[in-house]
Amino acid sequence: MNKSQLIVLATALAATAALYYLVPTTKPKVSGAAAVSASPGGEQHQHNDSVFTIADYEFHALEALSTERQQYLNGLKAAVKRGDVKDQSLHLNHQLASFWKDSVPNPILYFYYQNSAARLENTEKTLTFAAHSILGYLPYAENNPTQVWLANTAKASFENALALNANNDSSIVGLGACIMFGADPGAEGPMAGILKVRSVVEKDSTNMFAQYMLGLGGLQSRQLDKAILRFEKVAKAEPNNLEVLFKLAETNELMGNKAKAADWYMVVLNKVEVPEMKEELKKRIELLKKP
């Protein structure tokens, strides 16, 4: 098996973990091949001739629904009347987020409506919850335009949360991570993301969220040895953190450390309970142990 095949399989296995443990599992249908950024006010800015827009994305998602479900959603939206439009809109966004999370799982639309509700409530708690929910999905976004749009959406919510509490290290790390995943860095430049995360680690080396994000930064820049050191530190502090355990297995595999990768996949195997995941892990371990 060549190196490119190993990379594909390692990435796919990590994505499998995300499907089971991180977010709803329906793959999004994306229109367009270029990125679009969302400003804190919600406007969208085109970067190329064809773009990802949430309106176009939702249009296609609605097309795939049954007539009954389309009528149900139209009824919810029609219920917003004159009067206390803000509270009605907030209730509507919660209903739509619930629909796209539970009735017809679609992570992109769930995040969109959850985030829209958080913007209306404008509390640190709701903004950070919505932003962190998106951030957890970013490594597994189906393609770059989707990832960039989501990163900008989460970035705006982290910025709003920091306007309410500038000393929240978790929000600072989250903001930096969004930039690392493609959000517009603004005037601070492309290094802004990693620098924000590093500033938190320099202040508190025990912040495992920041350490993990630096590991992801090392993985993105192909500084795999440095990424492993960060991931190992998090795994030692959080031995049941499946996400970091997968990253350790994946990164070792990318480095060609088959034995270590197999060992880390075995650690994960002993911690998961989903039968399908166990089977995939067993297959992966067997392949890595072949001469």
Image (cartoon, grey):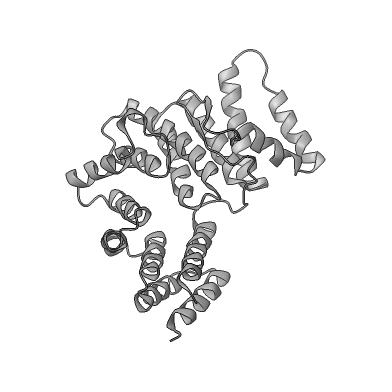
Q: Quadrant of the C terminus?
A: bottom left
Residue 111: % across, % down: 54, 40
Q: Which one is nearer the viewer's eye here, 85 or 33?
A: 33
Residue lying at 27% horizontally and 58% vertically, measured from the top left? 230
The answer to whether residue 82 is above or below residue 18 is: above
Of all residues shown, which one is farthest toward the left? 203
Of all residues shown, which one is farthest toward the bottom? 291
The answer to whether residue 159 is above or below residue 263 is: above
Residue lying at 51% horizontally and 68% vertically, measured from the top left? 9
Task: State which quadrant residue 32 falls in.
Answer: top right
Left or right position of 45 against 104: left
Residue 37: % across, % down: 49, 32
The answer to whether residue 26 is above or below residue 261 is: above
Of all residues shown, which one is farthest toward the front? 49
Residue 43: % across, % down: 52, 24
Of all residues shown, which one is farthest toward the top? 83
Residue lying at 51% horizontally and 26% vertically, measured from the top left? 42
Q: Which one is nearer the viewer's eye here, 34 or 44?
A: 34
Residue 254: % across, % down: 39, 67
Task: State which quadrant residue 184 falls in.
Answer: top left
Left or right position of 59 against 115: right
